[in-house]
Amino acid sequence: MRRWLALSWLGWSLWAAGVPAAGENLQYVINWPSGLNLGEGRIKASHDGSGNWNFEFQLEAAVPGFGVADHFLSLTTENQCSIAFEKELQHGKRKTREKITFDGGTATRETIGGGKSTLTVPACARDALAYVFHLRKELSLGRLPPAQSVYYGSPYQVRIEYTGTQRVRIGDAYEEADRLVASIKGPASNFSVEAFFGKDQARTPLMVRIPLAMGTFSMEIVR
């Protein structure tokens, strides 16, 4: 279970927030350490009629005997402050659906068909998708966000470290990218992901790598 939570973070770390004003529609492949394709990720970003942002991330992957189909939706203000976050997860035979609503410093977390709880949060709290959107915007301004709580359900402490420029292979070509390492700590998990962002104005997310017990998996943009 934890390794697929990490894989979801892998996808989010790919996608952040120097998103063009017209929105984005990006596709990624998920690869086994040997290079064998495991599945794909799809990311969309768009403005709604009121100036808010809609973000969507879908992840479909499989290893022998275990499939994953995750779907995430985030609605934020223009400043990447969360309004609502929904996640629908299918890990093997287990399915869960959850929604978090943010309002006036309170986050209400509801499991569909289950319980409900509330949590005090900052006035501008960010769910996982809103956070990576914010991260990419900060990168486009030449800075990193400070360590902070990010809401995936429970709060997760996230810290970003810039480690320099590196050439990464995307398909048959190499591209210059900024390498970041995100340290993520939650109630029952502690892991890190390695993310590469392009040097273009939009700070296009190119690749993410994450070390797991089975090896280092990667998620790479499809050009």
Image (cartoon, rainbow, N blue to C red):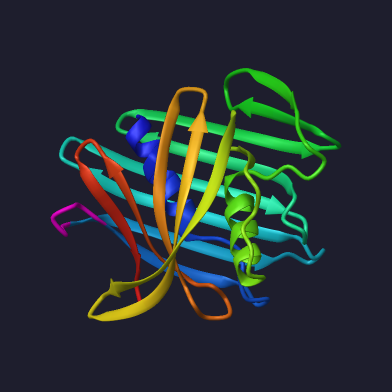
In the picture provided, is 150 more to the left or to the right than 164?
right
Direction right: furthest residue: 104
Direction front: furthest residue: 164
Q: Quadrant of residue 136?
A: bottom right
Residue 34 is inside the magenta segment: yes
Is residue 61 visible to the viewer in this orientation of the structure?
yes
Above or below, comparing residue 120 to residue 46 in the picture = above
Is residue 152 visible to the viewer in this orientation of the structure?
no
Q: Position of residue 113 (x, y in %)?
A: 57, 22
Q: So how many labels did they put on this image?
A: 0
Direction top: furthest residue: 115
Above or below, comparing residue 134 to residue 96 in the picture = below
Q: Position of residue 151 (x, y in %)?
A: 62, 37
Tell me which residue sits at (77%, 59%) in the image: 79
The N terminus sits in image quarter? top left
Tell me which residue sits at (65%, 65%) in the image: 137
Q: Main secondary structure of the magenta part?
A: loop
Q: Position of residue 196 (x, y in %)?
A: 42, 64
Q: Quadrant of residue 86?
A: top right
The C terminus sits in image quarter? bottom left
Residue 177 is inside the magenta segment: no
Tell me which residue sits at (65%, 58%) in the image: 134
Q: Position of residue 185 (x, y in %)?
A: 50, 33
Instruction: Read off the magenta span.
Output: 31-36
